[in-house]
Amino acid sequence: MLNLLKKSSFFLLAGLAVFFFVVFTKKQDSSAELPIDTKDTDELFQDDTNSESTVDNEQSVVVDVKGAVQSPGVYTVEQDDRIHDVIELAGGFSKNADQSQVNLAQLVQDEMIIAVPEQGEQETNISSGINDSNDKIRINYASVQEIEHLPGIGPSKAETIFQYREENGLFRELEDLLNISGIGEKTIESLRDYIQIP
């Protein structure tokens, strides 16, 4: 009888030991997996945040389309869009449009007026570098000859400004001219009253 009790106690203790071992091992495994799951979740949230900030960083510009297009009006487009994209948004050219006077490859700029002339009309103000209302040089549309009229800008520097604009796109602020060799802060200040951007 005593031997039977000893055997029963032994099996009971052994069973309890196995039970606690299994429970403890499972608990350790689940806690070991937790950081991995958390990390994966964190990465998912981080990716979502990054994608949201990317969308927020995309800047848009507003342009005014006038003249010989199907649907004139004000349009909001991305800053890297071209005039071609804006004309498409406006329904395309009307049948009387003089497409030869419009530079479809030109990058758009905030507050830009895209005036499409009808056949027989003179060139539009989009291709003119001089603002008739204040006689300022519209540096983003001016020809080399028009840029030469600026104080302190000779033929060579005018050509450099024109070339820089062709290669790098429209000037977004007057200080962008500082990227051009030979133009410093003093030159910028002297040009401030003579240049219009946009």
Image (cartoon, helix red, strand yellow):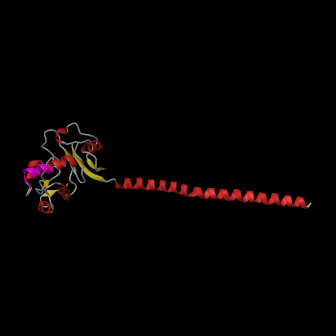
Q: Is residue 191 magenta?
A: no
Residue at the limit of the structure toward the top, as seen here: 95
Q: Main secondary structure of the magenta part?
A: helix
Regarding residue 142, the answer to whether it shows in the image is no
Q: Is residue 155 magenta?
A: yes
Q: Is residue 53 left or right of residue 82?
A: right
Quadrant, the C terminus: bottom left
Q: Is residue 13 left or right of residue 145?
A: right
Q: Is residue 40 left or right of residue 5?
A: left
In the rendered image, residue 147, in percent from the top left (x then y), is placed at 10, 52
Regarding residue 56, the answer to whether it shows in the image is yes
In the rendered image, residue 90, in percent from the top left (x then y), is placed at 28, 44
Residue at the limit of the structure toward the front, as seen here: 3
Quadrant, the N terminus: bottom right
Residue stretch rendered in magenta on the structure: 153-161
In the rendered image, residue 174, in percent from the top left (x then y), is placed at 18, 58
Residue lying at 24% horizontally and 51% vertically, measured from the top left: 109
In the rendered image, residue 49, in percent from the top left (x then y), is placed at 43, 56
Residue in front for this viewpoint, 28 or 98? 28
Residue 121, image quadrant:
top left
Residue in front for this viewpoint, 176 or 102? 176
Residue lying at 23% horizontally and 39% vertically, measured from the top left: 94
Counting every numbered tag in the picture gives: 0
Residue in front for this viewpoint, 123 or 118? 123
Residue lying at 28% horizontally and 46% vertically, measured from the top left: 81
Residue at the limit of the structure toward the right, as seen here: 1
Q: Is residue 193 left or right of residue 3?
A: left
